[in-house]
Image (cartoon, helix red, strand yellow):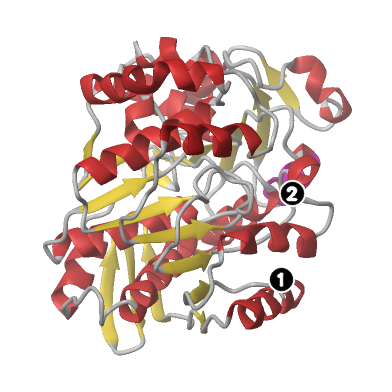
Amino acid sequence: MIKEIMSAHLRNDYQRQNFDSFLKKVGFGYKRPTIHIAGTNGKGSTAKYIASIYKSAGYKVGLFCSPYLNEINEMISINDQIISDDEFVSIYEEYAKMIKKYDLSEFEVETFICFVYFERNNVDIAVVECGMGGELDATNIYDSILCIITSVSLEHTNFLGRSVSEITQQKCGIFRPMVPVLIGDLAEESKTVVVSECRLNKSELFVVEKPNNVSNTWDGSIFSYLSYKNIKIKSPANYSVFDACLAIKACLILASQFPIKDEHIYNGLSNVTMPCRFDVISKKPLIIIDGGHNPEAVENLVKSLQNLHNFAKIHTIIACFKDKNIENILNTIAVESSSLTLTTFDHPRARKEEDYFLYLNDYKFEENHIDLINKIIAENPEDIILITGSLAFAALVEREFKDGILKK
C-alpha cells in the first residue's frame, strides 16, 4: 500500500518552494536534537554507526537513511525498529489533502513523515541522512546539533553544480550558526569551501583522524582509533573503517550533551550490518554484493578488494542506472577484474544493452542477469564473484539469493 501511495508523487525537480509552503501551511516544526549528514558516499553507514552507538548507550534513537533496499519503511526507524505500514499510512492520510495540494515529491513525503514520527515518539536524538546535496534537500528544515560531510566528489551535477567546489557549497547548506561541523578526508578544494562556511557561521570545525593498525579479513575489520584499541566491525571493507571513525568522532564531539561510555562505542559498532555494502553473502564460492554506483564509491570498493583478494581472480557483474558515470566506473573496476560482464534488470532507470553501446566492444553484455550470475558462479567456484553497479541492483540480487532464485 505504501508503494502505491508513493507512486503518485512523481515530481523530480530540485527546489524547496512547494515543501516550504506546505510546512508553513500545516504549521509543522521539527525540534528533536538531530545530527545531519551530507556527503557523496558514506552517509548511510556513518549514520547507522552513530545510531547504533547511541542505542547501545540506552538512548531512544531515530534514524533516517535513503534510499531503501526493499521497502520504503526501512528509511525510518527508532532503535532499529522500522515504522510500521499502519503508522506510515496514518501520518500520510492525516496530511494527504495538503500533500497533494502542494504536489510534494516522494522524498519530501518520506522526509515529512519521518520528522512527524520522530516528534510524536519523542526520540532522544536522531541521525538524518541528506537525500541529495544539502541546501535544498528536504531534510534541511531544522537546526541540527552537529553537521557532518563525509566525502565530496562529482555527483548529480545537473542539480548540485559542475565542480567539486560548487557541490561542496551545496552540502555546506546544512550548516547552522555556532553548530559544530565534522568532515571526512576531503580534498583541499572541498576543505577550502568548508573552512570558509564555518568561519561565516562561527562553527567549530573538526576533521576525522585516520585509523591505525587496520586489519581487514572476509569476516570483518579490526582497527584502532584515537585511544580506542581493537575496535571490531562486521564489514571487511576498508571504507567502512573510516565511516566508523567518523561515527566515533561525532559521538565524542557531542559527549557533553549525550554522554557515552567506551563500551557503548565498542558494542554499538560491532552490532552494525551493512546490506549491499561490500556484503559477503557466501564464503564458498566467495560472493560479494556492493551497491557502489559512482566513481568514488567504486574506487573505495576496489581499494577494499586490493586489501583482501590475495591475487584470486575476480569476476565482476555490473548493472548501472542510465544517469551514472559508467565510463569511470568501468575503467576503475576493470583493472581488478579477470572478467567483467554487463547486464540489466527490471527498473525504469536501468541501462539496457543499447545504453552500453560505447562499451560493447570491450565487455560482454548478457540480458538475463539471473542466468548470467548462476553461470559465472558455476564456472568459477574457486574465484571471487563481485556483483555491483547500483544499490537497486544489489538489493534485487540479494533478495534473489535469499529466495533461492540465485544459487550460491
Q: Amino acid at mark 2?
A: Leu
Q: Nearer the viewer, residue 194 or 69?
A: 194
Residue 102 percent coordinates (x, y): 57, 23
Which residue corresponds to the image point at 32% horizontal and 38% vertical from the top-left? 116
State the residue in front, 190 or 396: 190
The reply, left or right, for residue 194 in relation to residue 394 is: right
Q: Secondary structure at mark 2?
A: helix
Can you tell which mark lies on residue 160?
2
Q: Quadrant of the C terminus?
A: top left
In terms of depth relative to the viewer, which is nearer, 33 or 381? 33
Q: Quadrant of the N terminus?
A: top left
Check if residue 381 falls in the magenta segment.
no
Q: Which residues are magenta?
A: 327-333
Q: Residue furthest bottom?
A: 227
Residue beneath disc 1: 190
Task: Pinpoint residue 217: horizontal percent, then vertical percent.
Answer: 36, 62
Tell me, yes or no, if residue 273 can be seen here. no
Between discs 2 and 1, the one toward the N terminus: 2
Query: In the rendered image of this protein, does residue 372 appear above or below residue 392?
Result: above
Q: Is residue 127 left or right of residue 190?
A: left
Tell me the kind of residue under disc 1: Ser
Q: Horizontal placement of 98 versus 399: left or right? A: right
